[in-house]
Amino acid sequence: MLRFGRYVRAANVEDALEVLRFRKGAQVMGGGMWMRLSDRTVPCVIDLSDCGLDKIEETEDEYRIGAYVTLRDLECAADFNYRTGNVLNAAVHDIVGVQFRQLATVGGSVFGRFGFSDVICALLALDSEVELVGAGRVPLATFIDMPYELDVLTHVIVKKHDYQASYQCLRKAATDFSTINVCAARWDGTWHVAVGSRPAKARLLAGEALGVSSAEPTADEIARAVEAVRGLAYSSNMWGSERYRRHLAGALTARSIVQAARYASTEAYQAALAACTREEAIR
Ligand SMILES: Cc1cc2nc3c(=O)[nH]c(=O)nc-3n(C[C@H](O)[C@H](O)[C@H](O)COP(=O)(O)OP(=O)(O)OC[C@H]3O[C@@H](n4cnc5c(N)ncnc54)[C@H](O)[C@@H]3O)c2cc1C
């Protein structure tokens, strides 16, 4: 059972950071859905409920997702999902169940930097940053490799672009962790592919490293992207072997690129689909 020595309801995020840094063993709590799995006493738990972090705000250039926005809020945020290729809705709607998603937060999901995270994989392919009280604004791709410092995550920021995007994952059973997850997004004329649950943390490939440049990727370009993604490191655990993950990562990359792209002609779409089917075949 999870127990707390002290409970602090911070009035603002600066106070929360001060408590976090000066009270030994203090921890911020999001929805507590991950924390509650451990059997220990947290000497001091910090609640951010009074810090106004439970909203998705929109400015001219970006969406600012508060750390206390729940996964269910994110799933149901119609305008945000519409403008970002629906990838966050697709990434979270199979996480456990609605009651769970009503509690699990975006802040806990991103700060935790779990390798299996569907949330991080989807955000990574978009133009995303995190905002921390101490470290300020940091690109998500940088943040996921940063050491676990004592800091308070206040927002996840998704910059506005004309996104073409698609999220794909494979779960051995509904609501299980993803064996592999992939998100492809094209914005500012560049393709981005994030691959997570390798099972290590998600990795992002973009531009030349991915080998896809056109708005309507050809069979050759899709094959290059698949090869690039299959060149990442994978390993085995109870959700899948290294070899299976490598294969799936390629297949889901092809599928997500084809679904995200807007093909102008049926012939171009069919050629891309045929390439996709070739990558799905087990050799
Ligand atoms: C059974 C189960 C199945 C799951 N399946 C999936 C899945 O399929 N896909 C998926 O993507 N995720 C999955 N998750 C993860 C889940 O979606 C949440 O990411 C996770 O529960 C953390 O969110 P939380 O709000 O509960 O955070 P908490 O448990 O409250 O916190 C997690 C960690 O983040 C820290 N933290 C929280 N908020 C902040 C903040 N604002 N600033 C700084 N630190 C903070 C906490 O101190 C703690 O270390 C699963 C979790 C469980 C328990």
Image (spheres, rainbow, N blue to C red):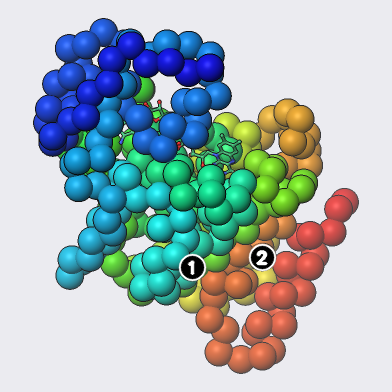
Vertical placement of 47 versus 158: above or below? Answer: above
> Residue 91, relative to residue 241: is it above or below?
below
Q: Closest to the observer: 43 or 60?
A: 43
SS category of the residue bearing label 2: helix
Depth order, front residue of 92/250: 92
Q: Residue at x 79, y 60 (%)?
A: 280
Residue corresponding to mark 2: 255
Q: Give how far across and how far down residue 121 sits, in percent.
A: 50, 48
Exactly how many numbered labels are in the figure? Answer: 2
Asked if residue 251 shows in the view, the reply is yes
Which callout, 1 or 2, points to the residue nearer the camera?
1
Where residue 86 is drawn, which disc sits there? 1
Residue 28 falls left or right of residue 251? left
**Label 1, label 2: how far apart the Cα atoms are:** 15 Å
Name the kind of residue labelled 1 in the image: Asn
Q: Are marks 1 and 2 in contact (CB under 8 Å)?
A: no
Question: Can you tell which quarter of the image residue 163 is in?
Answer: bottom left
Residue at disc 1, secondary structure = loop
Residue 135 in percent (x, y) is at 19, 32
User: Which residue is at 46% across, 50% downward?
Assistant: 102
N-terminal of the two: label 1 or label 2?
A: 1
Foreground pick, 213 / 153: 153
Residue at position x 32%, y 69% from top? 161
- Amino acid type of the residue tagged 2 in the rendering: Arg
Q: Choose top left, top right, bottom left or bottom right for residue 55.
A: bottom left
Q: Is residue 264 above or below residue 258?
A: below
Q: How many residues crowd around disc 2 within 10 Å: few (fewer than 14), some, or many (20 or more)? A: many
Local crowd size for mark 1, using a 10 Å CA cut-off: few (<14), some (14–19), many (≥20): many
Q: Residue at x 36, y 73 (%)?
A: 79
